[in-house]
Amino acid sequence: MNSRAWLLIVLLAPAGGCSSGRVDAPRLDAGKTAAAAPAEDDSNKDGFLDATELQRCPGLQNALLRFDKDKDRRFSRTELEEYFTTYVESRVGLQDTVCLVTFDREPLAGATVDLEPEPFMGDSSKPARGVTDANGQARLETQGAGTAGCHLGIYRVRISKTSPQGKELLPAKYNTQTQLGIEVAPAMRGQPAFHLSSR
């Protein structure tokens, strides 16, 4: 089992739709973004992102099942461009995003959840952050937005919880050496969940 064994994305109750029209959708060049993604992660330079290469970008890996049109288990540049075009056409400014975090099968309260846009997203997505409540749920807010919600995009996720003395309580694979990722897509149909483990 690969490094994603401990990360399960489950579908729960709908997390909510997009925010009100007060926030304009960020400008995204679908073609430029589609070209930048393989440029960063296409290690064998064949013009595709295959299953092995996508392990380095777990957020984009999560999108593969929905946008792999020819079902060859890899992303072509054309598929990526079509994929990012759906972001542009949605005209969503901020997508309401609530994630669930558990640790050893129990809700994890007081954890900070940081979303960092993958570099190929350029300036179309900004970082977002939330803190989990007693139920392990965090409503994410984009930096500088002043309201809840995330820009559409592909993110690296870092989850951290520290002791009163400042010691990190979670394994490094969830924060400083994270292997977690998320796709924030138009009209998300489920609540992303990160099931963390002490093992």
Image: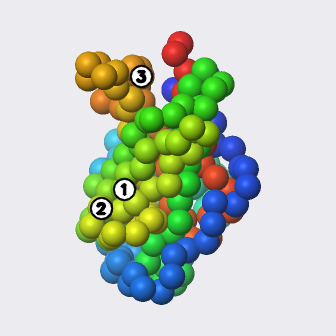
Which label was assigned to residue 143? 2
The quarter of the picture where the N terminus appears is top right
Q: At x 55% / y 74%, what residue is drawn?
A: 18
Q: Could you say which is closer to the camera, residue 55 or residue 76? A: 55
Q: Is residue 193 above or below residue 19?
A: above
- Amino acid type, residue under disc 3 in the picture: Leu
Label 1 – label 2 distance at C-alpha = 6 Å
Q: Residues within 10 Å of mark 3 (few under 14, many from 20)?
A: some
Q: Could you say which is closer to the camera, residue 7 or residue 96? A: 96
Quarter location, residue 104:
top right
Which label was assigned to residue 128? 1
- Amino acid type, residue under disc 2 in the picture: Gln
Q: At x 30% / y 61%, what residue is drawn?
A: 143
Q: Position of residue 32 (x, y in %)?
A: 32, 72
Secondary structure type for disc 3: loop
- Would residue 76 appear left or right of 64 to someone viewing this image? left
Q: Residues within 10 Å of mark 2 (few under 14, many from 20)?
A: some
- Amino acid type, residue under disc 1 in the picture: Ala
Label 1 – label 3 distance at C-alpha = 20 Å
